[in-house]
Image: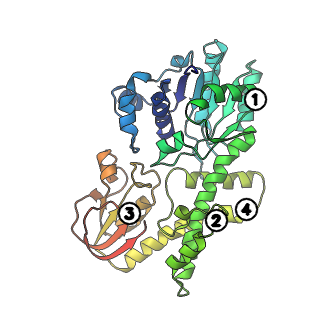
Amino acid sequence: MKSLPKVGIIGCGYIGIISAVCYASKGMQVVGIDLNAKIISDLVSGKVPIHEPGLDVLFQENRDRLSFSDSYADLAGCDFIIVTVATPTQTDGVVDLNQVTRVMQSLTELALDGSISESVLVFRSTMPPGTMKVIRTEALSKGLNLRLLHYPEFLREGSAIEDLFNPPRVVIGAEDVAVFEKFRDQFLIHFEEDANTFLTSFENSEYAKYVDNSWHALKVAFGNEVAAIANKHSVNIRDMYDIFVADNHLNISARYLRPGAPYGGSCLRKDTDGLKGLAKQGQVSAPLICSINDSNYSRIEEIVALVKSRNPSKVLIEGLSFKVGTSDVREAVQLDVISSLSSEDINICVFDPVVEAAGNTAQNFVDAEFCATEKWDFHLRFHNLLTSEISAIETLDLT
């Protein structure tokens, strides 16, 4: 039986904590590192700071193999150190790599004193092509020949645990095949043995996440644009949708192409802007990529305009998280809708038990409150959460 590695996770955000818990569930000893004292305090006390279906149970079942710290020194002796820190895209399309830079400064110090001399450094953060080469070059300038891999994550919030254990494919960027083989034989073999694995260059691996998320973003925006045009020409968009997605030979995703709510969340907008930034940096004309988020925002404006046209005094918004079944409200389109409607002195009420239970209430973001059902002038349904019928003059179903 293959021995189990000791794994370090840097960044205990969404991807980091889910990864740590899943790796521990396979018998690995895992240490999570984060400089946010509140996150570490919660995790040490047994509180999972995010909601993901099945995560809390898995966390509690494997606490004896999980440890958390704000000290990089606790990474000493780890076979694999997996970096999952955030890389937000700025308004000008430039990807902010400050957290990655700070991580490398700390890891370089550990490497120089020999604490992680045998460790493989695995980056899961989304980074522009060329970033791993820069990391390697800077390490070499300090006399360090680090073992480096780029291993992009493709986890979907709401089904992240299933995606981690059963990925549609695994992408690994590497320059040293021996480093990849060590990672494959000692780490991947424990839970991704049957996945279709692509060993590729650093640049290809880094680029893969941008392509994936921009494609997903494109599908949502395209479906809604087609629906908007269809509505002006007496086309039944639901029938048209069924006809269109029947052709699945080109891997068309029915889930993403179905007309509904605009996309939100921390990935699609960010990575689409990131790809736009890459086009700009390369002086490449990419009008479609550059217009995706604009198209998405226009759908938000249409929703707001429709609600306002009804002159409602009371509006119920069903679902606040950007993805049903999670507590994540980062860049949820509902927040844009609520903000616009609230400026019109419309009374807004939000119903989302998962977000409310997580303590991530709407009051953190907008002037709205959670409530029980009653009679409403307008009902905006982003998720199917209500277990009983409500009384509303008009409902716009965006599920």
Q: Which mark lies nearer to you, 3 or 4? A: 4
Q: Which residue is mark 1?
A: 177
- Label 3 is placed on what type of residue? Ile
Under circle 2, the secondary element is helix
**Is residue 94 in view?**
no
Q: Are marks 2 and 1 in contact (CB under 8 Å)?
A: no
Separation (CA) of disc 3 from disc 1: 51 Å
Q: Residues within 10 Å of mark 4 (few under 14, many from 20)?
A: few
Q: Which residue is mark 3?
A: 338
Separation (CA) of disc 2 from disc 1: 39 Å
Q: Residues within 10 Å of mark 1 (few under 14, many from 20)?
A: few
Separation (CA) of disc 4 from disc 2: 9 Å
Q: Quadrant of the C terminus?
A: bottom left
Q: Which residue is mark 4?
A: 286
Disc ID at residue 291:
2
Q: Residue at x 45, y 50 (%)?
A: 330
Under circle 4, the secondary element is loop
- Label 4 is placed on what type of residue? Ala
Mark found first going from the N terminus, 2 or 1 = 1
Most distant residue in the bottom direction: 234
Count every numbered label the image shows and give the total. 4
Q: Could you tell whether 116 is left or right of 325 in the image?
A: right
Mark found first going from the N terminus, 3 or 1 = 1
